[in-house]
Amino acid sequence: MKRLFRTCLLASAMAAGLGLSGPALAAEGPSNDDLLNDAKSTGDVLTYGMGLQAQRFSPLDKLNPDTVKGLVPVWSFSFGGEKQRGQESQPIIHDGTIYVTGSYSRLYAVDVKTGQKKWQYDHRLPEGIMPCCDVVNRGAALYKDKIYFATLDARLVALNKDTGKVVWSKKIEDYKAGYSATAAPLIVDGKVITGNSGGEFGIIGMVEARDAETGELVWQRPTIEGNMGTLNGKESTMTGVMNASWSGDLYKTGGGATWLGGTYDPETKTLFFGTGNPAPWNSHLRPGDNLYTSSTLAIDPANGDIKWHYQTTPHDGWDFDGVNELVSFDLKKDGQTIKAGAKADRNGFFYVLDRTNGKLLSASPFVTKITWAKEIDVKTGRPVYNDDNRPGTPVGAEKGNSVFAAPAFLGAKNWMPMAYSPATELFYVPANEWGMDIWNEPITYKKGAAYLGAGFTIKPLYDDYIGALRAIDPKTGKIVWEYKNPAPLWGGVLTTGGNLVFTGTPEGYLKAFDAKSGKEVWKFNTGSGVVGSPVTWEQDGEQYVAVVSGWGGAVPLWGGDVAKLVKDINQGGSLWVFKLPKA
């Protein structure tokens, strides 16, 4: 026994001397520099968005409009069990392993070559969770020896990347008050950056940073003015100015959830987080702009301070969350190169901002019908409202006048991420054409109860299509090409140096299009609706593509007449991997 003990000590000492650690002396995971260079590396996918700026562009070009016909499935991995519902995840690929989250707060590690499961973590969810828009999870974050993801009971969990064992688990907020979490975390300078969900329950939106090693809170920034931020365990600064755009105590239940997560621009050292709708939806109960809801916030990752903000829908009365991602890019126009950011907002406008200061450069419609505003005034940055398209004020116990508004509250673009190609200098935006009957109702806040004060029914605008993948030129705001789909588009987009654009459809297809012309050049049916985000990487000289399949999300739950149109789409839960074999 003593000899065995000495042998174990010797092995441990040798491992330490060689810089090895962890189970089976596993290799260290990606460093901070690896994450910063993810957009350029082609042998892995280390971040949500395929780069911290979230352009979702890969320089790989083995797959192109001519060769994509040779793209074939390699294997499919089932998430198993009866826990299906919406599968909105984006896979992470590193060192022979795919990490992918599933519905009901599950995380899997799968062998890239064989599709064999290495480990599975099922988060133990309590009774009484209150996710607004299905039991989805959009992805994980990988850093050094840990993999991180958020859960439906509003926790952030860190697991050992090789074993799936819990390293730490931290409470973000109280799920009994309506808080949850669905977004993929972001790793910046050794900190795990997350947002929260629950705006429909009158919570307080916030962004927080935790130490990646210990999980301890570094800073927290509320998104509703009047609430205090924290830094290193102490109060730091107030968000905004008390009662500047919120009356009375409404700031205590103001919504503004940051439920889609954020992006990061290393060039300006800035986090960009979108904020959700104000609470309640009934705008007559909360006069003012209601900062910082339905906005993009530029945040200092060191301390959580807000550098600038841009509000897309002041005094939002239609549930036009501003959570959609701000994608950093270089805008080349009139002989100049501007550090810009683009956002396809739920309200129907495609915004281009100077990402160094938040100044509006342009705002153009990317759907065919917008009723709530005539235009966005570029000088002021504010919408020119159609006042008669705001739902009416309730009178006593009676609901207010109903209006037909477009887009519908599920948005011209909802959560599904767009992509940008530096090669074509175009954005590829998954859009939807629908409107809604919407009216306001009396409402009072009650902890843990829905806090809407509105009723609605979503309706398609056209008989032949709802979803539209659109290529948009950010220099002009013009639509270069479009692909129309009968059902709503609810999945993310990928574009490549091989002149391809990939996205999925509820009908079950993963499709590829020519990035310049929009011509459909390949498709494969996965057996269930695709509402995840595809990725691509290179391995052993071959180009791979992966996507999660599994119909669900907000459309079947909240879609009104549209939900009836897609009620027969089968649910699922699987990860598909494809490759272009060597010639």
Image (cartoon, grey):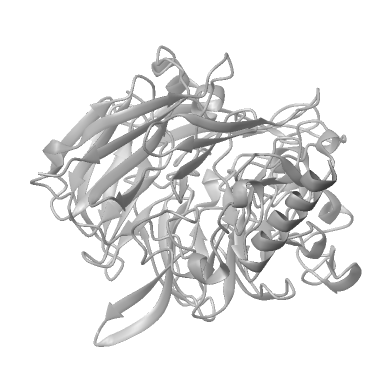
Q: x and y percent of residue 528 in the render? A: 38, 21
Where the C terminus falls, by quadrant?
top left
* Residue at the right extreme, as displayed: 234
Q: What residue is drawn where x is 49% and y is 48%?
A: 346
Q: How many labels does the image show?
A: 0
**Would residue 471 appear left or right of 388 to someone viewing this image?**
left
Residue 510 image offset from top left, x and y in percent: 29, 33
Q: Which of 572 and 43 is in front in this view?
A: 43
Which residue occupies the extreme bottom position in the image? 335
Residue drawn at the location 72% of the way across and 57% of the way down: 10
- 199 with respect to 415 (left or right): right
Front-lying residue, 68 or 108 = 108
Q: In which quarter of the image is the N terminus?
A: top right
Examine the rendering and report whether any part of residue 471 can be seen.
Answer: yes
Q: Position of residue 358 (x, y in %)?
A: 53, 75
In this view of the protein, which residue sits in the foreground, 160 or 430? 160
- The residue shown at (72%, 45%) is 157
Can residue 169 be seen here? The reply is no
Looking at the image, is 212 positioned above or below residue 475? above
Q: Quadrant of residue 445?
A: top right
The residue drawn where x is 53% and y is 80% is 268
Residue 216 at x, y percent in the picture: 82, 59
Above or below — where is 431 with respect to 454?
A: below
